[in-house]
Amino acid sequence: MAGDAVVGALRVVLGADTADLDKGLKSSQSRLAAFADVAKASMALAAASVAAAALAIGASIKTAIENADKVNKLSQSTGTTTEEFTRLSYAAQLADVSQESLGKSLGKLAKAMVSAGTDAAGTAAQAFTAMGISVKNTDGSLKSSSEVLSEVAGKFEGYRDGAAKTDLAIKLFGKSGAELIPLLNQGKQGLADSGDEAEKFGLVLD
């Protein structure tokens, strides 16, 4: 009788333990399934992030190439080197002057320099003479337009803003000359400092 009671008690205990074990296993399986779902979602998100990053990098590279090509063409049309133009472009950006306006203005300046170099009595020559600026080097060759722009800026920073200053800018840089005044007001040293900063930031193309 006592043996039967012991066996019965063992069956009860083992049954309870088995039930607890089944319950624990089911709970573990549920947690593992939930973890698997989270892991899958995380992997999908990571894959999407990598794909988005790849697209962004590709777009950035494309934009950089297009901008470099644009700058190269603008520098050729304005009589400057790519390096000089990108240095000036940074200074222009700080003065809220667009690349397009800078390019047009430098193109007009180059024409004014040629005119001043061949016609000493012309309007452009008179404007340069009034500022005490020579468009030619000591060997008789024309200076670069970026060099003359720097010299003009050195004069403009000391001139009072007004109609006379605007008129002078238009004579030298064409209709877009008025837009260039904030850039010229930085002065020769200001343009040099901005160019050095652009080079420091890796924005200058050679």
Image (cartoon, grey):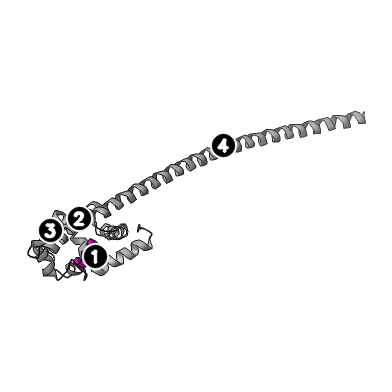
Does 133 appear above or below 79? below
User: Which callout, 4 or 3, points at the residue further toward the start of the chain?
Assistant: 4
Res 90 → quadrant: bottom left
Q: Residue at x 66, y 34 (%)?
A: 29
| Mark 4 lies on residue | 40
Q: Judge left or right: residue 63 versus residue 169.
A: right
* Picture coordinates of residue 11, whole percent (x, y): 83, 30
The answer, for residue 24, to whether it is visible in the render is yes
> Of tags 2 and 3, which is closer to the observer?
2
The local secondary structure at tag 1 comes to: helix
Q: Residue 107: give its label.
A: 2
The front one of 116 and 75 is 116
The local secondary structure at tag 3 comes to: helix
> Of tags 4 and 3, which is closer to the observer?
3
Kind of residue at disc 2 = Gly
| Mark 1 lies on residue | 147
Q: Which residue is drawn at 60% across and 38% down?
A: 35
| Mark 3 lies on residue | 170
Is label 1 in contact with label 4 (beta carbons under 8 Å)? no
Kind of residue at disc 3 = Ile
Q: Does the magenta stretch include residue 148?
A: yes
User: Which callout, 2 or 3, points at the residue further toward the start of the chain?
Assistant: 2
Is label 4 in contact with label 2 (beta carbons under 8 Å)? no
Is label 3 in contact with label 1 (beta carbons under 8 Å)? no
The local secondary structure at tag 4 comes to: helix
User: Which callout, 4 or 2, points at the residue further toward the start of the chain?
Assistant: 4
> Of tags 4 and 2, which is closer to the observer?
2
Give me the C-alpha separation between circle 2 and circle 1. Answer: 13 Å
Give the quarter of the figure containing the C terminus: bottom left
Kind of residue at disc 1 = Glu
